[in-house]
Image (cartoon, rainbow, N blue to C red):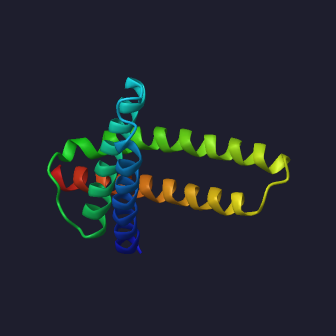
């Protein structure tokens, strides 16, 4: 299961990067500095998450072993916040009588957030145990 999730995560990341680059190509000069910084940080975190998931799924040893344990908690805080925002948005849309599609998207995003964090957390534990 972890191998399939890691491969799907990497494909999703690559697809998202292509779409984001295409959309941002024409609007780079008009974008605010905060949006550029936020985009760069989120891209770096998603790339680091993809590396950690692939390393965990395929039993690889990626350098910077001390990074993965604190990164899993930073990622957990970020994904927890994103999950709360997703739930709040779902509740706001549900009160307006929107589709059941919103529930499916919420469920999918919560599952991806949870398994992303869990894979990085497990990889951090494994690298800490093998280094010690």
Relative to 101, 41 lies left or right = left
Which residue sits at x=55%, y=60%? 111
Q: Nearer the viewer, residue 105 or 74?
A: 105
Which residue sits at x=33%, y=41%? 71
Q: Nearer the viewer, residue 99 or 65?
A: 99
Q: Nearer the viewer, residue 3 or 25?
A: 25
Label tally: 0
Residue 122 pos. (x, y %): 35, 57
Residue 21 pos. (x, y %): 34, 49
Q: Residue furthest front?
A: 26
Q: Quadrant of residue 34?
A: top left
Relative to 77, 92 lies left or right = right
Which residue sits at x=30%, y=51%? 47
Relative to 65, 45 lies left or right = right
Q: Nearer the viewer, residue 3 or 47?
A: 47
Residue 99 pos. (x, y %): 78, 60
Which residue sits at x=85%, y=53%? 97
The vertical placement of 38 against 131, above or below, is: above
- In the rendered view of the protein, which quadrant contains the N terminus? bottom left
The vertical placement of 103 against 41, above or below, is: below
Residue 108 pos. (x, y %): 58, 62
């Amino acid at each position: 299961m972890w191998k399939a999730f890691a491969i799907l995560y990497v494909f999703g990341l690559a697809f998202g990067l292509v779409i984001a680059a295409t959309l941002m190509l024409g609007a780079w000069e008009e974008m605010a500095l905060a949006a550029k910084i936020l985009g760069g940080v989120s891209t770096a975190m998603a790339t680091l998450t993809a590396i950690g998931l692939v390393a965990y799924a395929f039993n690889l040893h990626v350098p910077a072993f001390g990074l993965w344990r604190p990164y899993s908690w930073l990622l957990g805080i970020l994904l927890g916040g994103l999950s709360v925002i997703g739930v709040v948005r779902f509740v706001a849309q549900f009160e307006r009588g929107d589709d059941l599609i919103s529930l499916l998207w919420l469920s999918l995003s919560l599952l991806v957030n949870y398994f992303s964090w869990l894979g990085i957390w497990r990889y951090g534990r494994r690298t800490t145990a093998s280094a010690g």
